[in-house]
Amino acid sequence: MKICAVELRSNEAIICLLSQNDGLFDLPECRSQKFIMQDSMDNEQMRKFQQTFKKLLDDYQIDRVVIRTRETRGKFAGSAVGFKLEAAIQLIEGIEVDFMTSQEIKQKLKRNPLAIEFRATGLRQFQEAAFMTGYAYMGKY
């Protein structure tokens, strides 16, 4: 199974690709680590974001997208642009999208802790939350 784990921060979709085969994880190289939305009020840019994201999923033969959820209200609430990006990803035809809350991720990581330090993965520091989301999700399978 190949997944694309996503963390949405304000106007960015930070991604991490993961695959699991016979219990072994693989972090395939990816041409892009994040997508930035400059103007969410521009229909053309929203379409371009969605098409670019779909192209990446097709090129890397991704089976499923997993999005780390954000609060809808309160101090740690997600931005309106983030929710628009989430909807654009959800509406990509032919792809399954799942969500994981921070609490679910913490529980999964507690039961199945990461065997190596995050730095050893070779990913960038800003991808850590997306990676942890994907790793926790893969713990289901």
Image (tube, helix red, strand yellow):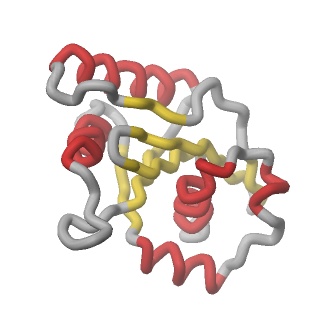
Q: Does residue 125 appear to the left or right of 119 in the view shown?
A: left
Q: Position of residue 70 (x, y in %)?
A: 32, 63
Please report the residue visible at 40 percent of the width from the left and 54 percent of the height from the top: 67
Q: Does residue 30 appear to the left or right of 89 in the view shown?
A: right
Q: Position of residue 5 (x, y in %)?
A: 51, 49
Tell me: residue 44, above or below residue 139: above
From the viewer's side, name the closer residue of 84 and 30: 84
Please report the residue visible at 34 percent of the width from the left and 39 percent of the height from the top: 11
In the figure, residue 100 lies in which quadrant? bottom left
The quadrant the C terminus occupies is bottom right
Please report the residue visible at 19 percent of the width from the left and 47 percent of the height from the top: 80
Q: Position of residue 81 (x, y in %)?
A: 24, 41
Q: Report the number of numbered marks.
A: 0
Tell me: residue 6, above or below residue 44: below
Residue projecting furthest to the front: 75
From the viewer's side, name the closer residue of 87 and 20: 87
Tell me: residue 49, above or below residue 44: below
Q: Position of residue 38 (x, y in %)?
A: 32, 25
Please report the residue visible at 25 percent of the width from the left and 51 percent of the height from the top: 79
